[in-house]
Image (spheres, grey):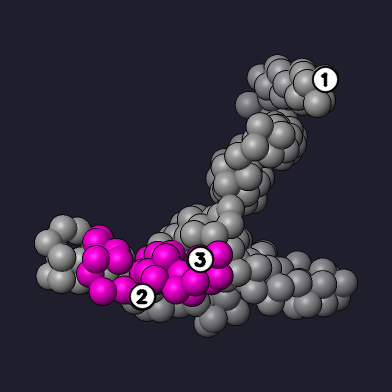
Amino acid sequence: MNDIIVKTVARILIPFIQLYGIFIMLHGHVSPGGGFAGGAMIGTSFVLYTLVFGIDKSKKKFSERVSEYAESGGILLYIALGLIGIIMAGSFLTNIDAGFPKGTPGSMFSGGMIPLLMIGIGIKVASTFITLFHTLIEEEEA
Amino acid sequence: MVWLNALIVVFLIVCAIAVERTKDLVSAVVILSAYTLMMSVLWLMLHTPDVALTEAAIGAGVTCILFLAVISRTERYE
């Protein structure tokens, strides 16, 4: 696609989509949304980048190597937080009893480790969507 | 607000029948996207904004794009 209007609008719009996705991801415990919805929004912004600027440029931004590290890192962050719960308090994903700070209710820094869990889920979901789309588009050319 | 819910449900039924009747797969995907967007409005009316947000992002965004990518690899008309 070689249209200057589409390219300009996408270049302006993509950072705001990603910012909104991160906002939804981090506020999963105090407002609607969460890791899955936020991660899907970030993945969709990369899909928009691929549609506008082509698969080659998108591969440079988000290569398969980065995708491998992001998927494994997201789920490993989740498992590590669960294991902290086992070590400190005895059961998987123990939150406040394992020593995570409570914070003030209603603000972003509350709910112990839930925002960290949401970051892990969001990274995994986003990279999964990007990998799915890249795989489908790539096989078309081969 | 009951009549608005009923209107949305009627729209959903019409969309579902239209998806089944059409022969053009691209327009079927577009109708499915409209169905999903109305579905997320219906979730919002039923006081589940969490599901509505996920439905709008996944159903209208990702599913539509993945279906279009698959159609571009196969035939457009059934």
Q: CA distance from mark 3 to mark 2?
A: 11 Å
Circle 2 or circle 1, nearest the eye? 2
Q: Amino acid at mark 3?
A: Pro
Answer with the quarter of the image where residue B76 lies. Answer: top right
Magenta range? A93-119
- Density class for disc 1 (Cα within 10 Å; few <14, some 14-19, many ≥20) is few
Of A11 and A101, the residue lying toward us: A101
- Report how far apart the C-alphas of labels 2 and 1 lie in the structure: 47 Å
Subunit under mark 2: A
Element type where label 1 sits in the image: helix
Mark 2, residue position: A101
Q: Looking at the image, can residue B70 be seen? A: yes
Amino acid carrying label 2: it is Pro
Q: Amino acid at mark 1?
A: Trp
Name the image quarter holding the N terminus of chain A: bottom right
* Residue A124 seen in the current view: no
Where disc 3 sits, the SS reads loop
Q: Residue at x 87, y 72 (%)?
A: A5
Label 1 is found on which chain of the structure? B
**Residue identifier under label 1:** B3
The chain letter for the residue carrying disc 3 is: A
Front tag of 1 and 3: 3
Q: Quadrant of residue A99?
A: bottom left
Q: Position of residue A108 (x, y in %)?
A: 53, 71
Q: Please name the residue that numbered disc 3 is placed on.
A: A105
Badge 2 element: loop
Residue farthest to the front, as pictured: A104
